[in-house]
Image: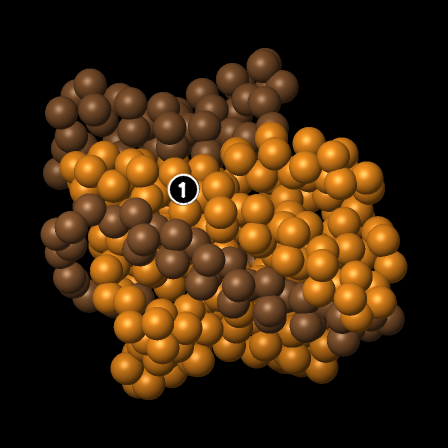
Chain colours: A brown, B orange
Amino acid sequence: MLSALTQLLVFQLLGEVVARWLALPVPGPVLGMLFLFVALALRGGPGQELQATSQNLLQHLSLLFVPAGVGIMVHLHRVADEWLPLLLSLVISTAATLVVTALVMKLLMPAQTTPGEIP
Amino acid sequence: MTPPISEIWVYLSASPLLGLTLTLLAYQGAFWLYKRSGMNPLANPVLIAVVILVLLLTLTATSYETYFAGAQFVHFLLGPATVALAVPLYTQFRRVRSLLLPVLAGLVAGSLTAALSAIAVARLFGASLPTQLSLAPKSVTTPIAMGIAERIGGIPSLTAVLVIITGILGAVGARYIFDAMKLRDPAIRGFAIGVASHGIGTARAFQVSEQAGAFAALAMGLNGALTALLLPLVLGWLR
C-alpha cells in the first residue's frame, strides 16, 4: 500500500509541477492522472499493489467530497438571494446535460454494445 | 479530580482530531444507510454526511475553519484519488478506444449543453449576470470551475457551492433519467454522469460498476479541460 500511495503522490506532484510550469488551465491531479495512464500503457498495466490501493481509494471516493461539501455552510448566504433561478437552472441544466450527452452517444454507438451493470 | 466537561470540549474543539473523526463517523453512518437502502441513489452518502455535519457544526457553534483543520486530511486525498482514476481507465481502455467517436461527440455536446442551458435557464428566471456566469462552469470539477468563473466574470465561491450541488443532483437523479430513456450501456451512463456531475457523479458510478466509473472519470477529466478552453471563447462570441 505504501509504495502504491507513494507512486500516486509522485504522479500528482509531477502533474502539479507541469501544470504550474506551463500555466495550463487543468489542475495538477488531472494531469497526474494522464501521466500515470501513459506510464501504465508503457509498463503494460498496474501492479497488483497499485491495482488494490486505487480500488480501495476509489471505492470511497464520495467520502473525499464531504469536507468540501460541508463548506457549503459558509457560502450558503450567496445562494439565498436568487435561490429560485439557481435551483431551476441547476436541476434543468443537469438533467439536460445527462440527456443530451447520452442521446448523442447512443446515436453514434457502433452496432454491438455490451450490456452490464447500471449506475 | 476530573476536569469539567467544558474544559475537555475546549481542548478537543481546538484539535484536528475531532473534525477528522466526525467526518469519518458521519460518512460511515451515511454509507451504512446507503447500503441498507440497496444503494438507492436518493440515499446519496455525500448528501447525508454533509447534512449531518452541517447540523452538528451549527448546533455546537463550531466554525468551518475549525472543522476543516481536521477534515483537510480527508480532503487532501482527493489529489491522489484523482491520479488513481488512471488505473480503471487503463483497465477499460479497449472499450474507450472502440467508442472514440461517441465519446468525443458526447463530450462536446454535453459540455456545451451544461454551460449554455445553465445560463439560459438562469437568465429566463431573472438571475443577475454574475450569477449566470457563476453557473456556467457548474458541471466541471471544483478547482477548474472556480478558475473558469474567475476568468469569465463569475463569483468563484458561489461557483464552488453550485458545483457541489450539481454533483449531488447528478448522482441522485441520473438513474431515473437513464431508466426513463431505457439506456442500459454502462459506458454511456457513466460518461454522461461524468460530463454532467464531475467527481461526485463519478463516485456514484464507481459504486455501481467499474466500467461506468472509468467512463465517468474520463468524462470528468475531458470535460474539465474542454470547458476551460471552450467556455471563455463561446461566451466571447455570444457577447
Q: Chain of mark 1?
A: B
Q: Position of residue B216 (x, y in %)?
A: 37, 51
Q: Is residue B233 visible?
A: yes
Q: Residue sitting at 38 percent across and 58 percent down? A: A103
Q: Is residue B172 left or right of residue B153?
A: left
Mark 1, secondary structure of its residue: helix
Residue nearest the observer in this picture, A85 or A6: A85
Quadrant of the rendering where the C terminus of chain B is positioned = top right
Quadrant of the rendering where the N terminus of chain B is positioned = bottom right
Q: Position of residue B33 (x, y in %)?
A: 38, 82
Residue nearest the observer in this picture, B115 or A24: B115
Residue nearest the observer in this picture, A89 or B217: A89
Q: Quadrant of residue B180?
A: bottom left
* Amino acid type of the residue that numbered disc 1 sits on in the rendered structure: Ala
Q: Residue sitting at 76 percent across and 49 percent down? A: B133
Q: Is residue B118 left or right of residue B41?
A: right
Q: Is residue B31 visible?
A: no
Tell me: residue B208, above or below residue B89: below
Q: Residue sitting at 58 percent across and 53 percent down? A: B114
Q: Position of residue B56 (x, y in %)?
A: 64, 78
Q: Position of residue B11 (x, y in %)?
A: 67, 64
Residue position for label 1: B105
Classify 10 Å Cα crowding around label 1: few (below 14), some (14-19), many (20 and above). Answer: some
Q: Quadrant of residue B123?
A: bottom right
